[in-house]
Amino acid sequence: MPGSTEHLVVVGGTSGIGLSVARAAHALGCQVTIAGRGAQRAADIAGSIGPGATGLHIDLEDTASIRAALADGPAIDHLVLTPIRRLATSVKDFNIVEANRLAHIKLTGYVAAVSAALPRLKPTSSIVLFAGLSKANPYVGSTMISIVNGGIVGMTKTMAVELSPIRVNCLSPGLVPDSPTWERAIQQGATAIVDAMAARTPARRLASSADIVHAVFFLLDNRAVNGIDLEIDGGIQLV
Ligand SMILES: NC(=O)c1ccc[n+]([C@@H]2O[C@H](COP(=O)([O-])OP(=O)(O)OC[C@H]3O[C@@H](n4cnc5c(N)ncnc54)[C@H](OP(=O)(O)O)[C@@H]3O)[C@@H](O)[C@H]2O)c1
C-alpha cells in the first residue's frame, strides 16, 4: 500500500481504473493528483475524490500540456499512467490517422509524461504503466491496441534500466467487467461475451477494478519488483 505521507500522481485518473486507483490511495491518506484532458473537469473530479486531491490538465497528444502540468510541484512518490484511446482497427482495414493518435498517447505520450515528471521523482519512487492482455490475446480489430500494449512492456524494461534506482513496472489487465468501459458495453448487450470469458477463465471470474487497484499497490509498494509485466487475468492464457 502507498503510505499515508506519500504523493501519488495518476495520469488518466479522471476515469475508470485510474480513478479507482486515485480514490483508493486517497482513502489511505495519500496526497493524490489526477490528470486528464480539461483543467475544470480534472479539478471537478479531483474534488469528488475528497479534500486535498488535485486535478491537472494533461493531453498526452499535446507535449506542451505535459510539461506545463508535470515540470514543477511537490515530489512524486508514485506515478501511474493509464490513458488509452479506444480504437478498433485491423491490418486489412487500417486507419493510419487514428492509429498514430493511439501510438502518440500510449507510446511517446507515456514516455513524455515520465520524462517531464522525472525531476520530481525520488530514488525511492516507482512508476506503473498500463498495458493490457490484448498484447498476448489479440482479436480482429485489436491491431493497434495489441501493438501499443506490447510496446508498453518494452518501455517498462528500458525505463527500469535507464531510471534506476526508480522502479518501473507495467500491469496488463484482462477484461475488467466493472470498469466504466465494460459497464457501458454490458448495457449495450455485451453480457454474453463477458459471461463466456468468465466461464472460460480458470479462476471462473474476471478481475474487478478492486483487483487491479490491489495489483497497482503491490507494484508501487514492493521494493524488489522491477521491470515486470504483471498480468491480472484469472489465468485465461492457460486455456
Ligand atoms: N477496462 C478494461 O477492461 C481494460 C482491459 C485491459 C487493459 N486496460 C487498460 O487499462 C487502462 C485504463 O483503462 P480504463 O478502462 O480505466 O480506461 P478509461 O476509463 O477509458 O480511462 C482512460 C483515461 O485516459 C484518459 N485519457 C484519454 N486520452 C487522453 C489523453 N490524450 N491525454 C491524457 N489523458 C487521456 C482519460 O481522461 P480524460 O478523458 O479526462 O482525458 C481517462 O482518465 C488503459 O490503458 C487500458 O488499455 C483496461
Image (spheres, rainbow, N blue to C red):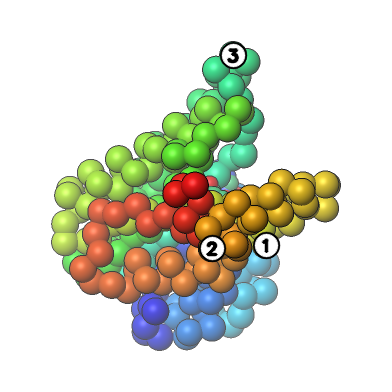
76 sits to left or right of 21: left
192 sits to left or right of 117: right
Q: Are marks 3 and 1 in contact (CB under 8 Å)?
A: no
Which is more toward the observer, 73 or 142?
142
Indicate the amino acid at tag 2. Answer: Ala
- Distance in Å between CA atoms under marks 3 and 1: 32 Å
| 145 shown above or below 14 | above
Mark 2: which secondary structure?
loop
Q: Residue at x 49, y 76 (%)?
A: 25
Name the disc covering residue 92, or none.
Answer: 3
Which is nearer the N-term, disc 3 or disc 1? 3
Name the disc covering residue 58, or none.
Answer: none
Determine crowd level at label 1: few under 14, some 14-19, many 20+ residues with C-alpha closer than 10 A: some
Locate residue 105, reporting x and y percent: 49, 39
Indicate the amino acid at tag 3. Answer: Lys
**Which residue corresponds to mark 1?**
178
> Residue 168's quadrant in the figure?
bottom left
**Which residue corresponds to mark 2?**
203
Q: Are marks 2 and 1 in contact (CB under 8 Å)?
A: no
Which is more toward the observer, 212 or 16?
212
Q: Quadrant of the N terminus?
A: bottom left
Determine crowd level at label 3: few under 14, some 14-19, many 20+ residues with C-alpha closer than 10 A: few
- Distance in Å between CA atoms under marks 2 and 1: 17 Å
* Residue that extends furthest to the top in the rendered view of this protein: 92
